[in-house]
Image (cartoon, rainbow, N blue to C red):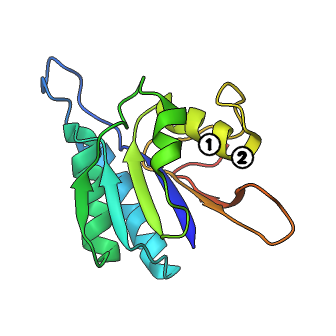
Amino acid sequence: MALYLVQHGKCLNKSEDPEKGLSAEGKMETERIADVARGYQVRVSRILHSGKKRARETAEIFSMRLSPASGSEPYDGMNPLDDVRAFAGRLRLADDIMLVGHLPFLERLIGLLVCGNPDQTVFKLQNSGIVCLDRVAEVNHPVIRWALMPTVG
């Protein structure tokens, strides 16, 4: 029972696309990471995204590769500057859910869940990257179980 956090793929700038959809590189990297996740048999029950075009497109790519039973849908409270404490209060860590969103929101959520402090950076996400948070018996809070990033270094 895990929580998968994904930063949206690289996007176009506003002059190219006012809604900032994924760039060709962003699509390619997201497809590559989603294929690796599928190869590792990552299972998600549903994918939630912020509703912004770049997050929705990233979620759709993961949804095509991972086939979550409940599909992919927009979810309120996941925009870049939204309140992570309010959002975390609505999270059920008993489900295998993937969240596709933005910085600084996702990194603040990781800090809150892992350390109890949203201002504590415990992991630096990359576009299209996945961080898996999970519970382990001997620890009272979620831990970072694994991460899959497009680049190393």
Q: Nearer the viewer, residue 103 or 15?
A: 103
Quadrant holding the N terminus: bottom right
Residue 22 visible to the viewer: no
Query: What residue is drawn where x is 37% and y is 43%?
Result: 8
Left or right of residue 137: residue 40: left
Write down the residue under mark 1: 110
- Under circle 2, the secondary element is helix
Q: Are marks 1 and 2 in contact (CB under 8 Å)?
A: yes
Place residue 63 in its image quadrant.
Answer: bottom left
Q: Residues within 10 Å of mark 1 (few under 14, many from 20)?
A: many
Left or right of residue 151: residue 55: left
Q: Considering only vertical position in the picture, is 4 above or below 55?
A: below
Residue 44 visible to the viewer: yes
Left or right of residue 16: residue 107: right
Write down the residue under mark 2: 114
Query: What residue is drawn where x is 51% and y is 38%?
Result: 106
Place residue 113 in its image quadrant.
Answer: top right
Query: What residue is drawn where x is 55% and y is 62%?
Result: 93
Q: Considering only vertical position in the picture, is 80 above or below 60?
A: above
- How far apart are the alpha carbons under marks 1 and 2? 6 Å
